[in-house]
Amino acid sequence: MRIIGLDIHRVFAEAVALEDGEYRRLGRVSMTRDHLLAFATTLRSTDHVVVEATGNATAVLEILVPNVSRVVIANPFQVHLIARAKTKTDKIDARVLARLYAAGFLPEVWIPDEKTLARRRQVTRRNQLVKSRVRLKSIVQSILHAHLAPRCPHADLFGGKGRVWLQAQVFPEDERAAIKRHLEEYDRQTEAQRQVERDIAAMALEDADVRRLMTIPGIDMVVAVGVMAAIGRIDRFASADHLVAYIGLNPSVRQSGDGPAY
């Protein structure tokens, strides 16, 4: 069996093959679909390919899976040998991935199904829009602060009453024009967020697990979908304790000798 270590970067991937205890550099592969498809045709049906978890790892996996025996995604936070390598090069990273897999010590990442991936993408889109809208509000607040405007008496500066109050403040013409642009962009992103939330809601109605989570006080549709997007298939966890540990809600004790426990 040949093991291929693939260290993925933004524009290229470094490939190294481990076979019969010997390493052979396969070179760099451009991170485009055409180049990856061409690289996949050079692989053997018995090969095992190991890649780090990156933003485009799933797309790489889809291209390579039909041509090899198995594709594994490694948890980058647990591959300590890469971080501790004295000489940090792409070639060493790819070799370490292959070596850890061959030794049976590679910390693997669960590969989500397409439904979970789509749900994660939608949750991410909504989060990005929420953060962008908050940023636009902060920009307008900074303009108010720069021109000594009083505190807005209304709860929502971008609400109906807040906008009327904002219009009555004294600003230079360029600042007033900037505020107008920020409000227009805020409205555009608000509509985009509503559309994403409608799409998320359509997903939620089809999922019994999401509907069940929504019966818990304090968990609305967005939170429930976000939880299920993080969990994926719940039956992949051997027990409730494993699920709690995966989410990070299990407190741990750190104590040395007779010192205080944290």
Image (cartoon, rainbow, N blue to C red):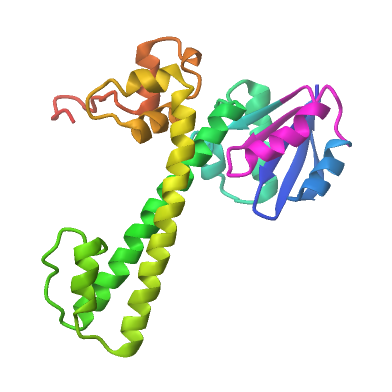
Q: Position of residue 199 (x, y in %)?
A: 49, 38
Q: Does the magenta segment cover residue 154?
A: no
Residue 119, given in percent of the width and then of the height, sits at 51, 33
Tell me if I can see residue 54 in this picture. Answer: yes
Residue range of the region highlighted in magenta in the rendering: 42-70
Task: Mark yes or no: residue 27 visible.
Answer: no
- Residue ranking furthest to the top: 239
Task: Pick out the residue farthest to the bottom.
Answer: 172
Q: How many labels does the image show?
A: 0
Which image quarter: residue 73? top right
Please report the residue visible at 36 percent of the width from the left and 58 percent of the height from the top: 133
Query: Residue 174 or 93: which is nearer the viewer?
Result: 174
Q: Residue at x 76, y 50 (%)?
A: 32
Q: Position of residue 157 (x, y in %)?
A: 22, 64
Where residue 30 appears, x then y in whole percent?
77, 52
Quadrant in which the N terminus is drawn: top right
**Is 185 above or below relative to 173?**
above
Q: In which quarter of the image is residue 10?
A: bottom right
In the image: residue 25, left or right of residue 259: right
Depth check: 250 or 5 in front? 250
User: Looking at this view, is 88 or 161 the one in front?
Assistant: 161
Q: Does the magenta stretch include residue 47?
A: yes
245 with respect to 125 (left or right): left
* Residue at the spot 36% in from the left edge and 28% down from the top edge: 224
Residue at the image point whose x is 29% and y is 66% from the top: 138
